[in-house]
Amino acid sequence: MAKRRTSGRDAEPDGAKAVRTRRRILEAAAEVLAEKGFAGTRLIDIAEVAEVQAPAIYYYYESREALIEAVVMEGTRNATIQVEIILGELTDADPVARLLAAVEGHLRVAMHGSAFTLASIRNSGQLPDDMRARKQVEETKYGRIWRGLVADVADAGLLRADLNPVAAQMLIIGAMNWSPEWWTPKLASLDEVVDTAKALITGGLLTAKNDQPALTPSR
């Protein structure tokens, strides 16, 4: 009797299949949460997008809230991870270059990253208190990165004296977080939005000095 040939899918270990299914459910939850919000997100809708039976979700996540929190926390951490990677490669760069690189990294994650970021941003005010508190811990860590970036610019004597550094940091993050709500590729390319944000920051935050670095267009 000829031996049955197995495809790659047939040969896939059960553990690997479970990991793939869990990720598919998580991505489906991010899509539904970004579109329908915390109150409107139902397991049956997530199951439909993930192409699984709704009860099967409980094999991977103990509750609807646990699944939503997993989405929100990944969305919250995405920008932090990306910005940390970028800054880690620019340890010797001047403070303005580091700030602008962080701006670009955040915008690319927020606007062109995934439904996770949208879900996290759009649902911050809808989450239960305990979930919001855990999310706030991650946001505080991220805020410290930006406080450091703006403080470094100020310490270098490049921040306008009439600006409050903390207010500047919060306004930058707030504007960038809102960008996914209005941006579409038809309105402007992502590169154009990034370059515009950099120009606004250099023009609005920095002192008028001839030695400011020239902006390099994003591509």
Image (cartoon, grey):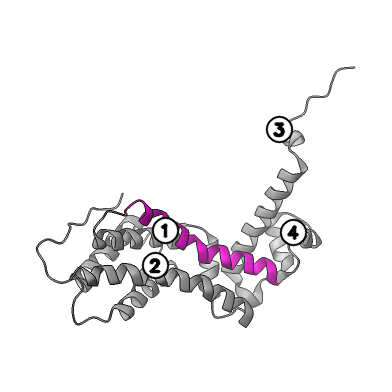
Q: Nearer the viewer, residue 155 or 183?
A: 155
Q: Which residue is mark 2?
A: 145
Q: Which mark is residue 206?
A: none
Q: Which is nearer the N-term, disc 2 or disc 1?
A: 1
Across and down, in percent, residue 181 comes to: 44, 70
Real-space CA distance between mark 2 and mark 4, rounded to the nearest whole angstrom:
33 Å
Residue placed at 39% from the left, 62% from the top? 107
Marks 3 and 1 in Cβ contact (< 8 Å)? no
Q: Which mark is residue 8?
A: 3
Real-space CA distance between mark 4 and mark 1, rounded to the nearest whole angstrom:
30 Å
Above or below, 163 against 99 in this view is below
Real-space CA distance between mark 4 and mark 3, rounded to the nearest whole angstrom:
24 Å
Res 155 quadrant in image: bottom left
Going by the numbered disc 3, the residue's amino acid type is: Gly
Element at label 2: helix
Magenta stretch bounds: 65-90
